[in-house]
Amino acid sequence: EAIGVTLPHPHGQIYAYPYVTPRTRRLVENISRTSPDLMQRVLDFERDGSRVILAGEHWTAYVPFAARWPIEVHLMPHRHVPDFAEATDAERDELAGLYLRLLRGIDALYDTPTPYIAAWHQAPVNVARDTVRMHLEITSPRRAADKLKFLAGSEAAMGAWIGDIPPEDAAARLRDAVEGVQL
């Protein structure tokens, strides 16, 4: 219910759109305006800071600089990978363990399971495959054991997000939670 779930059990959904979604279109436009290696530059910036939650040889998970949600994690491959089909066996193998640790760590933050949305973004089929990098975004409106973030005037009316938790603090909490995860 906290994230708009209509089926009362864990489940997943896969969407394949016959067009480039608005969010991906904005990403493609930002890459075109700034730099073809924008996603690599973002990853390099995040890997050099205090918001990294966990990292492997092929992937890094971090809380983004301008996180909008109380829990927001991005997981990105270290090299340009447009979609799952282009990932190597080693990348997919490492991804499985890192992803599981992230999800279990998020659930370990509180005594009850944390509602979340895990959204895999892949490059569009016919555009920007050489610049858009596959990545995961996990978000949750849960900001405390008994509190959710609701979109209020600033977010809903103005599109200006106010962060409830500094991203560095969120990353530290998630790092601690992930460190305690046993696979």
Image: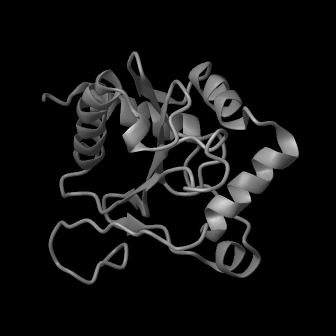
Q: Position of residue 102 (x, y in %)?
A: 31, 39
Q: Nearer the viewer, residue 122 or 11?
A: 122
Q: Residue pushed farthest front?
A: 126
* Picture layout, residue 32 above or below residue 160: above
Above or below, 178 relative to 125? above
Indicate how the structure is coloured in the image: one colour
Residue at 36% x, 79% y: name it.
4
Q: Residue at x 18, y 66 (%)?
A: 10
Quadrant where the image shows the C terminus: top left
Place of residue 52 in the rendered image (x, y in percent of width and height, measured from the top left): 49, 27
Q: Residue extending furthest top?
A: 57
Across and down, in percent, residue 61 comes to 45, 33
In terms of depth relative to the viewer, which is nearer, 145 or 42? Answer: 42
* Nearer the observer, 182 or 21: 21
31 on left or right of 52: right
Residue drawn at point x = 30 percent, y = 63 percent: 115
Q: Give percent across and percent down for residue 144.
A: 38, 57
Q: Is residue 113 above or below residue 47?
A: below
Residue ID at (53%, 25%):
79
- Side of 159 where 6 appears, left or right: left
Quadrant of the image for the N terminus? bottom left
Q: How many marks?
A: 0
